[in-house]
Amino acid sequence: MSERTLVLIKPDGVDRGLTGEILRRVEAKGYRIAELKQLSASEDQLAAHYAEHQGKPFYQPLVDFMLSGPVVAAVVEGDEVIKGFRSLAGQTDPTVAAPGTIRGDLGRDWGEKVQKNLVHGSDSVESAEREISIWF
Ligand code: DAT
Ligand code: MG
C-alpha cells in the first residue's frame, strides 16, 4: 500500500526560487505529487505542526521564520516515501547534510538561532497523517 508524506518548502526555499528545483528532485526520484499549494502559514497551524518542539530554545525562532514568507505545501505519495523523502532532504543541519541531498546541496548556515534548511518532511506514518490534516 502506497504511503503519503507532508513536504513543506520553507520560506527560505520559496524566497530563493528553489521551489521548482526541490519539486523536480521529488518527481525525479519517482514520487507523485498528489496535492500542492502555496500559502502563508498561520500561527495556529505552526503551533500544531511544531507541537513537539514547544519549549525548545529554537521554537520561537522557528515559528517566526516559518511566518516570514509563503511556504509551499505538498502531499507526496509513493512506497516508503516518508523515509525516502527524508533521505532526499538530508540531515537537519545543512552544514553537515550530505552533498547530493536538498539540504546538503542547496542549504547552509546563516548564523541564525534557527536552522534554515529549506524543507520539512514527516518522520512517521502517524506524523504524516496528523500533519497533512493541518495543511490540507
Ligand atoms: P527535521 O526538520 O530534520 O525533522 P526537527 O524536527 O528536529 O528536524 O526540527 C524541526 C526544525 O527546527 C528543523 O528543520 C530546523 C529547526 N531546528 C532543529 N534543531 C535545531 C537546533 N538545534 N538549532 C536551530 N534550529 C533547529
Ligand atoms: Mg522533524
Image: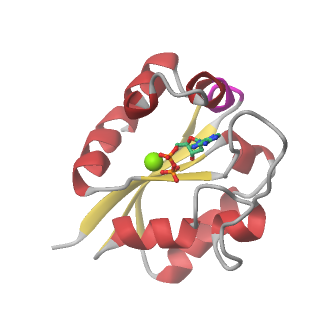
Please, what is the dominant secondary structure of the magenta stretch? helix
Q: Quadrant of ligand 1?
A: top right
Instruction: Determine which quarter of the picture holds residue 91.
Output: bottom right
Quarter of the image where the C terminus is located: top left
Q: Is residue 66 one of those drawn in magenta?
A: yes
Task: Out of 94 and 35, give the one closest to the viewer.
Answer: 94
Q: Residue at x 30, y 74 (%)?
A: 80
Toward the left, the furthest residue is: 1
Q: Position of residue 43 (x, y in %)?
A: 51, 18
Quarter of the image where the N terminus is located: bottom left
- Above or below: residue 96 compared with residue 52: below
Q: Position of residue 79 (x, y in %)?
A: 28, 76
Looking at the image, residue 16 sits to the left or right of residue 13; the answer is right
Task: Out of 125 and 70, give the one closest to the viewer.
Answer: 125
Toward the right, the furthest residue is: 111
Q: Residue at x 27, y 40 (%)?
A: 130
Toward the top, the furthest residue is: 43
- Please state the total of marks drawn on the protein image: 0
Q: Residue at x 49, y 72 (%)?
A: 87
- Above or below: residue 46 compared with residue 82: above
Task: Out of 35 and 31, give the one closest to the viewer.
Answer: 31
Q: Is residue 44 one of those drawn in magenta?
A: no
Segment tinted magenta in the rendering: 64-68
Looking at the image, residue 81 sits to the left or right of residue 39; the answer is left
Task: Out of 117 and 43, give the one closest to the viewer.
Answer: 117
Q: Position of residue 6 (x, y in %)?
A: 40, 52
Q: Residue at x 73, y 33 (%)?
A: 113
- Image coloring type: secondary structure
Q: Position of residue 64 (x, y in %)?
A: 66, 23
